[in-house]
Structures are given as C-alpha cells and as structure tokens.
Amino acid sequence: MSATFHHSVRRHVFLAMAVAVGGVTLAGCGAMNGPASFITPYRHDVVQGNFVSREQVDVLRPGMSRQQVREILGTPLLTSVFHADRWDYVFTFRRQKVEPQQFKLAVFFKGDALERFEGDTMPSEVEFVSRLEVARKLGAIPVLEASQESLDKFPPAAPTASPPPAAGGAVSYPPLETPAR
C-alpha cells in the first residue's frame, strides 16, 4: 500500500478520536453541578401576558362595566367567541435562577356587568417585585458623599454669563400652519 493511503487513514483516525474526545468533554460539562459549573448559557427573561396585582383585584366590584374592568386590569390575554362573557388574564414570568411564576384570573360578565371573578391569589406589587430579586453578592457599598477635603481640591466654578435679553422682549415664531387663502 502507498504511503499516502496510510497517511490518509491516520488522519481520519486522528479526526475521529478528536471528535470523540470533544464530545465526551462537552457532555461532561453539561453534567457538572459543582463549583466548576459556573459557565452557563444566557437565557433571557420571558414575560407573557398581563400582570394583575392584588391591588387591582381589590378594586373590582360586581356590577362594573366591561370598560371599567378593562381600565383596571388591561386588555385580557384570552377572549373566546364561544365564551363571550369570560375574560382570562394569564401572566407567566420565566427568569434565569428564579422560580417560574404563573398567575391566572378569570373575569365573568352577565351582559355588560361584572358578575364575578376567580383565580389565583395575586401578589401585591411589592411582593411581586421582591420575588424577582435575584440574590447578588455585592461588595461593600462605597460612600457616595464627598468630604470637604476632596471638595477643596477643586477650584470654585467660574460664574456663567446669562444670555442677553431678546430685542423687543418676546420672541416671535412663524405660524405652525399656513394661513387659509
């Protein structure tokens, strides 16, 4: 056999081994749960639907018109031709390193008047925001106030000249629309 054939076989075997080692290495990276698993892909926040707070639900009263409910809760996420007297508000939020959140509220009408509403216990706005906070390890917070010593290092600012007054007092601007002919 020729030398080029042996060289070609060696090259193919080397490439196959490199691919196998790379695959095993990458598979091992995905299985790590310890301190070496600091490399994670970025996953963006996924927000779907309308967030409805406890404060908004507390304002709802039977007998309100559809327009009043829409002004308080916003446009419903789901409406159906088959269930014209029901509006569904669904809100889901998925964020990296935070437990996924989902809230549902169904609003029922009789004609144009609110009959009843039911669903999950909605968090207050403050509770919802606190659930979004991701624990961060912050260092010492620097003092954000300048001492008199550091202020004395800078010369006082020179007074700025005020612009000259407009001739004749008021400034005249051209009309926004052309005069009618």
Image: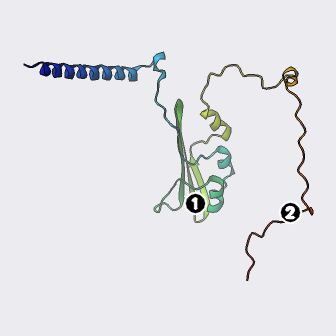
Quadrant that contains the N terminus: top left
Q: What residue is disc 1 on?
A: 109
Kindly indicate the quadrant of the structure image that contains residue 174.
Answer: bottom right
- Residue, far left: 1
Q: Is residue 125 above or below residue 83?
A: above
Q: Decide if residue 34 is in sight here.
A: no
The x, y position of residue 165, in whole percent, is 91, 55
Kindly indicate the quadrant of the structure image that contains residue 115.
Answer: bottom right
Q: Which of the two labelled residues, at mark 1 and mark 2, occupies the earlier sequence position?
A: 1
The x, y position of residue 22, in whole percent, is 32, 22
Q: Is residue 115 above or below residue 134?
A: below
Q: Quick check: 123 left or right of 21?
A: right
SS of the residue under disc 1 = strand
Q: Decide if residue 99 is in sight here.
A: yes
Q: Residue at x 59, y 52 (%)?
A: 117
Q: What residue is disc 2 on?
A: 171
- Total marks shown come to 2
Q: How is the image coloured?
A: rainbow
Measured Cα–Cα span from mark 1 to mark 2: 57 Å
